[in-house]
Image (cartoon, rainbow, N blue to C red):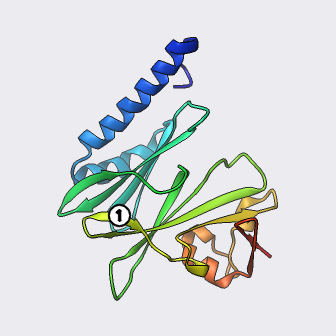
Amino acid sequence: MANTKQNGTNLQESIVSTNEQIRQTIERNITNTQILNEIQAYLPKKKHAFSFVLSNDKKFGVFSWNTGKNDFPIKNIGLYVNNNKVVPTSLYGNPINYDRIYTIQNELGPPSYILGGFEDPSKTPHSYHLSAYLIRGGGIEETQAFPNGESTITLRCDGNDLEKCLKTKNGSLVSDSLYMAIAQQTISIENGEYVFD
């Protein structure tokens, strides 16, 4: 989309059309888990203007891409497995450039899927968003996996070194164990964002 060289109304129409084609391609063509696995294996090896992440159990994935639109710069499409078929779905909240999904097994019910990503990684302070979902009853739903019964939280890192900010006490990155990192860190809330003290 960045290469589109049109003006005014034609440019907007082209952007809308391109995004609709991307959505339709994903929703119509990704119909089974084999295709999900192939996308996961192939996509990271190439440089694309969109990303795909897949959970460890291969039952929940998310496409994210830059739309080229100012009012909605990011688009997500979630994909989950139901009765051995891949079902496309919208995600709750504002779209995020998701770069990770972690599966937290639950002995009493379905696993939780923790999605992590940046709204804009170029801005400081960095805001890393975490959203928790379940696959249940033939669909996805948010789940309260975070402190204070939240299903979505934002971690704010004031420093310029994002990797250092997201490290837990044992030295691993939050991305390696998102839920444990949140549970172990001393955090406070400022303006709706969790801040590591």
Q: Which residue is mark 1?
A: 140
Image x and y of residue 32, in percent: 21, 52
**Residue closer to the observer: 150 or 121:** 150
**Residue at 23 percent of width and 53 percent of height:** 34
Looking at the rendered structure, the number of numbered marks drawn on it comes to: 1
Label 1 residue SS: strand
Q: Could you tell me the amino acid type at mark 1?
A: Ile
Image x and y of residue 31, in percent: 22, 48
Picture quadrant of residue 91:
bottom left
Residue 135 to residue 33: above or below: below
In this rendering, position of residue 50 left or right of residue 33: right
Image x and y of residue 7, in percent: 58, 11
Can residue 79 be seen here? The reply is: yes
Residue 167 to residue 30: above or below: below
Query: Residue placed farthest to the bottom in the image?
Result: 108
**Residue at 75 percent of width and 48 percent of height:** 123
In this rendering, position of residue 197 left or right of residue 109: right
Can residue 5 be seen here? The reply is: no
**Residue closer to the observer: 5 or 90:** 90
In this rendering, position of residue 98 left or right of residue 169: left
**Residue at 34 percent of width and 88 percent of height:** 108
**Residue at 25 percent of width and 40 percent of height:** 29
Q: Residues within 10 Å of mark 1 (few under 14, many from 20)?
A: some
Image x and y of residue 52, in percent: 43, 49
Query: Residue placed farthest to the left in the image?
Result: 83
Picture quadrant of residue 5:
top right
In this rendering, position of residue 158 left or right of residue 91: right
- Which part of the image, by quadrant, shows the C terminus? bottom right
